[in-house]
Image: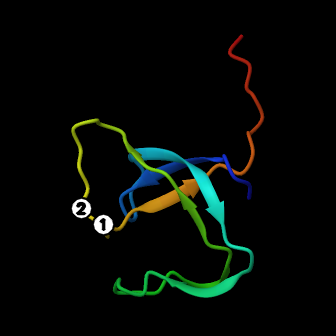
Amino acid sequence: MAIGLPVKFVLPGGKVPVGQGKVTRIAPQVEKRTIGADDARVRADSMVRPAWSDFTPADKGDAFPVNFRLEAWIQLFAGPQRSTD
């Protein structure tokens, strides 16, 4: 995890990007978090290192209310490049 890494935002459980950003801040230590606590089933209950990012909607006309829940996918490293030859 590092400041400046790209972040893709999707609706909870979705795959279609609704926004993008970059990591802007990382917490100095890990803390206990429960993911999916508001859902019908808990998806994870573990120690995580919180991070914050900026956000730009995929469609400039989109406006999300404050506290709207999204999932953030951080690209930690670039995957192998595939040749299209």
Q: Are marks 2 and 1 in contact (CB under 8 Å)?
A: yes
**Quadrant of the image containing the N terminus:** bottom right
The residue that mark 2 highlights is: 65
| Residue at image coords 46%, 86% | 42
| Residue at image coords 38%, 65% | 12
Colouring of the image: rainbow
What amino acid does circle 2 point to?
A: Pro
Q: Is residue 22 above or below residue 11?
A: above
Q: Nearer the viewer, residue 52 or 1?
A: 52
Q: Is residue 1 above or below residue 40?
A: above
Residue 67, image x and y in percent? 32, 70
| Residue at image coords 73%, 26% | 82
The residue that mark 1 highlights is: 68
Q: Nearer the viewer, residue 48 or 27?
A: 27
Asked if residue 66 lies left or right of residue 70, the reply is left
As measured in the structure, the alpha-carbon distance from the residue carrying label 2 to the one carrying label 1 is 6 Å
| Residue at image coords 24%, 62% | 65
Residue 7, image x and y in percent? 55, 49
Residue 57, image x and y in percent? 35, 43
Q: Residue furthest top?
A: 85
